[in-house]
Image (cartoon, helix red, strand yellow):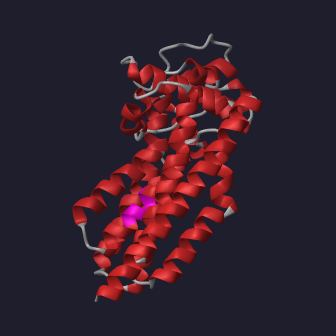
């Protein structure tokens, strides 16, 4: 028993140091990229978004407005009160806003992104330890930190997808340990990352559980319906909230001009979305 406890402790310590090494290297590279090169449009947009959140103007951004159809197609001057949620439902930023408030600066987003990706590796190690020995769990964690699919987004400009590893692995860990309150929490955070992210992951997990029968099939089917329903409801609700002129702009931008200059019907616009 003492030997087993020592091995577990040593494995956890190695996983911790792997994460710290990854965090330091990625942060240095990310900061060097930020100060040596120009940042992307998205990095500036999200910096402005968090800055407005801290001042009570939740999810408002003039940069989002400049990329909207009313500005691109109709030439409307970008508005400072434009809601970013009309383009992407990034409700999870409300959870991250207090962290940005500690030091409100564009480089804070780089630190936050690196920290979230690092924490995803630690969560993966905890998940692997549920069924695998320490050595194999460490190899899996090391492969996560060494993967191009992890390194690339980490050193790139800030984007909302950096939250996915932590939330997804947390969801799987809660399911493995049958901690249903945590399962609901991680599910909600995944759905809040972006309109399609959580729905696709929940649907995939539900399909796996339904096929393998690890849990009652109604549980897997329920996850499938929840994921599909959430993703399906987003474009429909968005299209219904658009004025007729904006729906016409969407159709023109993505699918060409409507026949004989007429504005397409709502159902055609929703199909286009």
Q: Residue furthest right?
A: 37
Give the image quarter of residue 129. Answer: bottom left
Q: Tell me if residue 160 is in the magenta stretch.
A: no
Q: Main secondary structure of the magenta part?
A: helix
User: How many numbered dots are placed on residues in this image?
Assistant: 0
Which residue is located at x 47 percent, y 36 percent?
A: 238
- Is residue 266 shown left or right of residue 9? right
**Nearer to me, 152 or 42:** 152
> In the image shown, does 33 or 42 lie closer to the viewer?
33
Is residue 156 in view from this perspective?
Answer: no
**Residue 109: image x %, image y %?**
54, 35
* Position of 204 relative to 151 (above/below): below
- Taking the spot 32% from the left edge, 71% from the top edge, the residue there is 175
On the picture, is 39 further left or further right than 18?
A: right
Quadrant of residue 269 in the image? top right
Q: Quadrant of the C terminus?
A: top right
Q: Which residue is depicted at the point 40% across and 45% down?
A: 192
Residue 106 point in image, percent of width and height: 57, 27
In this view of the protein, can residue 101 be seen by the observer? yes
**176 sits to left or right of 65:** left
Where does the magenta region start and end?
167-171
At a point 54% along the width and 40% down the height, the residue shown is 111
Spot occupied by residue 86 in the image (x, y as percentages of width and height): 49, 31
Q: Position of residue 151 (x, y in %)?
A: 66, 55
Please state, as top left, top right, bottom left or bottom right, where the N terminus lies in the image. Answer: bottom left
């Amino acid at each position: 028993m003492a030997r087993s406890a020592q091995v577990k402790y040593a494995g956890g310590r190695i996983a911790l140091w792997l994460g710290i090494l990854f965090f330091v290297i990625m942060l240095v590279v990310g900061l060097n990229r930020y100060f040596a090169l120009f940042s992307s449009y998205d990095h500036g947009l999200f910096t402005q978004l968090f800055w407005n959140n801290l001042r009570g103007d939740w999810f408002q951004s003039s940069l989002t407005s400049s990329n909207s159809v009313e500005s691109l197609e109709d030439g409307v001057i970008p508005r400072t009160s434009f809601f970013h949620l009309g383009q992407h439902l990034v409700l999870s930023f409300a959870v991250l806003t207090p962290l940005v408030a500690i030091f409100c600066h564009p480089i804070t987003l780089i630190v936050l992104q690196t920290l979230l990706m690092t924490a995803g590796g630690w969560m993966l190690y905890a998940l692997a330890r549920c069924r695998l020995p320490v050595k194999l769990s460490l190899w899996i964690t090391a492969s996560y930190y060494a993967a191009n699919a992890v390194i690339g987004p980490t050193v790139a400009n800030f984007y909302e997808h950096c939250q996915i590893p932590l939330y997804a692995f947390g969801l799987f860990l809660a399911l493995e340990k049958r901690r249903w309150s945590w399962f609901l929490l991680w599910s909600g955070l995944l759905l809040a990352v972006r309109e399609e992210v959580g729905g696709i992951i929940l649907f995939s997990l539900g399909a796996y559980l339904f096929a393998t029968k690890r849990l009652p099939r109604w549980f897997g089917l329920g996850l499938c319906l929840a994921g599909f329903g959430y993703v399906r409801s987003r474009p429909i609700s968005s299209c219904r909230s658009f004025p007729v002129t904006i729906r016409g702009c969407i159709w023109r931008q993505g699918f060409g001009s409507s026949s004989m200059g007429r504005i397409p019907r709502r159902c055609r616009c929703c199909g286009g979305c």
